[in-house]
Image (cartoon, grey):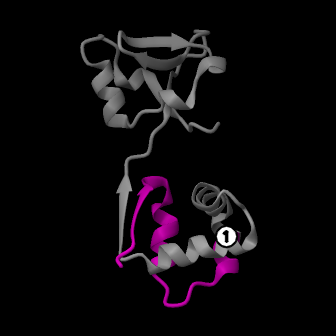
Amino acid sequence: MKIKLILDEKYKELVDDIVGVEYPNCSYFFDNYSKAICDLTEKWFCDESYRSQVKVIERIHSADEIEFTDHKYNWRLKSEKIFNRYVWADRDGLNFCSADCADSDDVMTESEFKKLLEGTGLPFEAFEKVEADD
């Protein structure tokens, strides 16, 4: 049975390091990639135990194929003079809100966000990416 993983591009550096060694040294990866490993451990095993974290490294190392998807972000206006800076989209289009209403459902890749801006007259350069978990 082939193992195929589909991961967010934010894990690419971790994956490259794990795949690049013959025998992964778990303590090295825990020291250098603890947040990424914990994220994947929680996602795959709903448990952040040491044993599950080792399984994450083993799963990546033994995968036959790994595909990366574009990372998704929340987006906001760069100007701090505007209170409702965060962008969210619904069927009616682009909307703005405060940080309190920015939701993980409103995350978009850069290409999705650029497409949303088309026809609005708003320049892409006026916005910045914000990690969805910030």
Q: Quadrant of the N terminus?
A: bottom left
> Residue most toward the right?
49
Which is nearer the eye, 72 or 31? 72
Q: Is residue 49 left or right of residue 2?
A: right
Q: Is residue 23 magenta?
A: yes
Judged from the image, the secondary structure of the residue bearing numbered disc 1 is: helix
Spot occupied by residue 14 in the image (x, y as percentages of width and height): 52, 67
Spot occupied by residue 93 in the image (x, y as percentages of width and height): 36, 13
Q: Report the number of numbered marks.
A: 1
Residue sitting at x 57%, y 26%: 103
Q: Identify the image quadrant of the C terminus.
A: top right
In this rendering, position of residue 81 left or right of residue 93:
right
Q: Quadrant of residue 31?
A: bottom right
Q: Which residue is mark 1?
A: 52
The residue sitting at 38% across, 47% down in the picture is 70
For label 1, the crowd category at 10 Å Cα-Cα, with few meaning under 14, some 14 to 19 and many 20 or more, is some
Return the residue found at the far bottom: 22
Q: Nearer the viewer, residue 125 or 113?
A: 113
Task: Name which quarter of the figure residue 30 lies in.
Answer: bottom right
- Please provide the residue range marked out in magenta: 1-30
Residue at the (51%, 74%) spot, across then down? 59
Residue 83 falls in which quadrant of the image? top right
Q: Kindly identify the residue that appears in the image at 45 percent across and 72 percent down.
A: 16
From what the image shows, is residue 97 above or below residue 134? above
The amino acid type found where label 1 is placed reads Ser
- Is 32 placed above or below 6 here? below
Q: Is residue 92 above or below residue 53?
A: above
Report x, y in % for residue 99.
63, 20
As for residue 89 lying within the magenta part, the answer is: no
